[in-house]
Image (cartoon, helix red, strand yellow):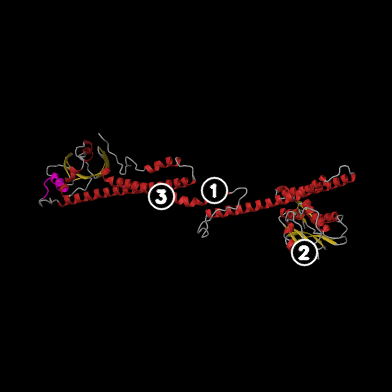
Amino acid sequence: MTAPTTTTEPLPRALPTPAVRALPRLRLRLPGTARMRIVGWVLALVLLALSVVTFVTWRLLLQDTDARMRAALVNEVEEFAGVVAEGVNPRDGAPFASVGDVLDAAIAYNQARPNEKFLGYVDGAFAYQSRRADDAPAVLQNDPAFTALVADVTAPVQQSYESATGEVLYLAVPIEFADPAGSTGVIVAAYLVDDEREAAHDAARVMLLVGALTALLAAGGAWLVAGRILRPLRDVADTARSITDTDISRRIPLGPGTDDGRDELRDLVHTVNAMLDRVETGVDVQRRFVDDAGHELRTPITIVRGHLEVLDAHDPADVASTVDLVDDELERMNRMVSDLLLLARSEQPTFLHPEPTDVGELTEDVFGKVVTLGEREWVLETAARVDAVVDPQRITQAIVALADNAVRCTRPGDRIAIGSQLAGGELRFWMADSGPGIAEADRARIFERFARGTSTGRRSEGAGLGLSIIRAIAVAHGGQVLLDSVVGRGATFTIAVPAVLSEESP
């Protein structure tokens, strides 16, 4: 015998959400390419969204079906009560003679809907059923347990019952009629819940089928869209593969319309192209540097080899002269290599060792050193009385190099002035001479490696690295080298660096 239950909203026997359970397996099987990962994630999100929508819709349909069944049961019982209250049989207009007549007329007068049954019980036994009883399994009228539940109720009862064919939602109401024979009656309106809910299940299945087709379409669309989105990345890879150590001029194509608006991929293309521009510039600079260094280093080697080839080993004077020349060229090569190493170190973080420095004292010390470089009219114009954070050795090196360059470009008795000053948030060290000056065409190139002035003054015996080293020292301090010159009236070189004053500075 089956027992009744009071649950009015039972869960279905099979939950129609296979897409939700398939998501973990789908994720594990995704290939490793970016395009497939995008498609996999899009497909997973679409399936998840469709599963949630299907589940929520299915539950709402079930709730609506249950609410409709309960409302229909109450409505049917109210109609039964109206027939009983009139006390007249609607078939022949005669008064009811017994409870059986009331049940027979009430059940016959109300037509059952699909999946709905009307049952009548007299004195605890089944007696009547609705006319659509043949359309549904004959389970309730032949179920002793159900009969025991409803046949003798004395007050309206609405419950659910698990029958042999599934859940049944019923409403049992006793007949209030004074039967001459003392008989009692109960009328029951019942719904076959599983059959009634089948429409909601069908709707969920249709939604799952449509959702599966939608997911396939979404996967196809995601495949196409991902291809277009990832195309710049493929261009990056193709361009990177095409770049060699001899040709780095290739750039990633932006494609038509890529300048209309901005997004992450366009930013990536612009950034990579800008990086390639910097790399190409750096490689070009490095190539020029290697070419120039090779040319400058080959010169003393050629000189030494030429003199050695014509050396008369039996002539002591020729040997001594050649040895002096070789020693001088080797010394020049050593100085050139040292300068090149210094320029290479200037781009490293350890090139500078800044420390709080008395700028005025530093200026006076440098002045005391450079006055021995040549017989010139040396003048200390001013010295900044501040404490700043600089590398005193590198600043001294730069000023001494400027002074040596000024001595090379002037004659005995010419004026060379040195000074330092704090102005406009910058610390300035300058070297001014009264030499021939620098031509306008040479002012930009003289700071390049191995460059020398061509139009004025005497040619320097150096390799053309002095001003490059000075500029490297200024740049390492975050500053620059300024040049102010008038041909025939001298030149002024100024090292301008940001003024980082120490705490002890007034």
Q: Which of label 3 and label 1 is nearer to you? A: 1
Q: Is residue 67 left or right of residue 240?
A: left
Residue type at mark 2?
A: Ser
Label 2, residues with CA under 10 Å away: few <14, some 14-19, many ≥20: many
Residue nearest the observer in this picture, 171 or 366: 366
Determine the main secondary structure of the stretch shown in magenta.
helix
Residue nearest the observer in this picture, 179 or 337: 337
Circle nearer the N terminus (3, 1) = 3
Q: Position of residue 168 (x, y in %)?
A: 26, 42
Residue under label 1, please give it.
237
Q: Residue at x 77, y 64 (%)?
A: 485
Cβ–Cβ under 8 Å for marks 1 and 2? no
Circle nearer the N terminus (1, 2) = 1
Q: Residue 485: which disc?
A: 2
Q: Position of residue 11 (x, y in %)?
A: 33, 42
Residue nearest the observer in this picture, 200 or 231: 231
Circle nearer the N terminus (3, 2) = 3
Label 1, residues with CA under 10 Å away: few <14, some 14-19, many ≥20: few
Residue that sits furthest to the top in the current view: 1
Q: Position of residue 343 (x, y in %)?
A: 73, 50
Which quadrant does the C terminus fall into? bottom right
Q: Is residue 97 magenta?
A: yes
Q: Residue at x 62, y 49 (%)?
A: 246
Q: Position of residue 38 (x, y in %)?
A: 47, 47
Q: Which residues are magenta?
A: 95-106
Residue that sits furthest to the right in the current view: 316
3D distance between C-alphas at marks 1 and 2:
50 Å
